Every structure is written in C-alpha cells, then in structure tokens.
Amino acid sequence: MSETAAPAQTEPLPSLALTPVALFAAEGAEARALREALGLNEPLQGPKPIFRGQVGGHEVLLVETGVGKVAAASAVTYAQARFNPRWSLWAGVAGGLNPRLHSLDVLVAHDAVQWD
C-alpha cells in the first residue's frame, strides 16, 4: 500500500494591511512634504514625530527622525520595536546635492559613504 504525503502546512502570510510600511525622513521639511503628498494625517504618540495613514490599501507610517546617525538609529529601532514594519524606506537623504532632483523624486542609492 503506497501512502501519499500530505501537503506541507505553511503559515499564512500576514495581511499587508496588518504590516505597515515605514517611511523615515530626517528633516521636518522632507517629512512635511511626504505627509502632505501621501495624506498621512493621523499623529501618533512617540519620542519622535510620527504620522499614520492609508496609501493604496497599505498602512503607512512616517517618522521624522532628526539629523544624524544616532537620531536615525534610534528612530528606526523604535519603529521596528513598536510597529514591526514589513518594509522600511528612507526619504530625503542628500536630495539637495543635485539641482536636477526635486521634492518627491525617487533616487535609488547603490552606494553609501559615512563621513561623520
């Protein structure tokens, strides 16, 4: 008698609506531009300015981190621990260095340099 193996049980993937996307911006002007463009109008309590909203069926968080690597690290650590985002994206880093770039342009880095 031959037996067939039962299909492997897999855990269901978490709903995208339950796993937020986190956006981070260092400067207030960068965060404000994103907040307005994406309609992230619900302020949340936290050690940094945090706003939440829905974009294309996804919960999106925006964290204004402050400038510098320590501020960035603390904001990302806090967001990861509190919200456990599915994706995390950084917005606004060094955008003023190239005059051809404008607010909300997308620039994908292939390299990074730590200078401080």
Image: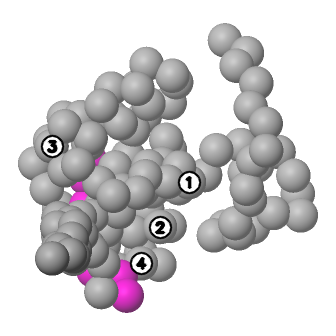
Whether pointer 2 and pointer 4 mark residues with C-beta atoms closer than 8 Å, the reply is: yes
Q: Residue at 44%, 30% (x, y): give it.
A: 72
**Image quadrant where residue 19 sits:** bottom left
**Image quadrant where residue 57 sits:** bottom left
Task: Report the predominant secondary structure element of the magenta stretch.
Answer: strand
Whether residue 70 sits left or right of residue 47 in the image: it is: right
Whether pointer 3 and pointer 4 mark residues with C-beta atoms closer than 8 Å, the reply is: no
Query: Which marked residue is nearer to the observer: mark 3 or mark 1?
Result: 3
Q: How far apart are labels 3 and 1 at the CA level?
A: 20 Å
In the picture, the disc for residue 82 is 3
To which residue does mark 2 refer?
A: 34
- Bin the neighbour count of mark 3 within 10 Å (Cα to Cα): few under 14, some 14-19, many 20 and up: few
To which residue does mark 1 refer?
A: 91
To which residue does mark 4 refer?
A: 38
Q: How far apart are labels 2 and 3 at the CA level?
A: 21 Å
Mark 2: which amino acid?
Leu
Q: Which segment is the magenta one?
A: 48-56
- Bin the neighbour count of mark 4 within 10 Å (Cα to Cα): few under 14, some 14-19, many 20 and up: some
Q: Residue at 63%, 70% (x, y): give it.
A: 104
Q: Quadrant of the C terminus?
A: top right
Q: Residue at 19%, 50% (x, y): give it.
A: 83
Whole-percent x, y for residue 37 in the image:
47, 78
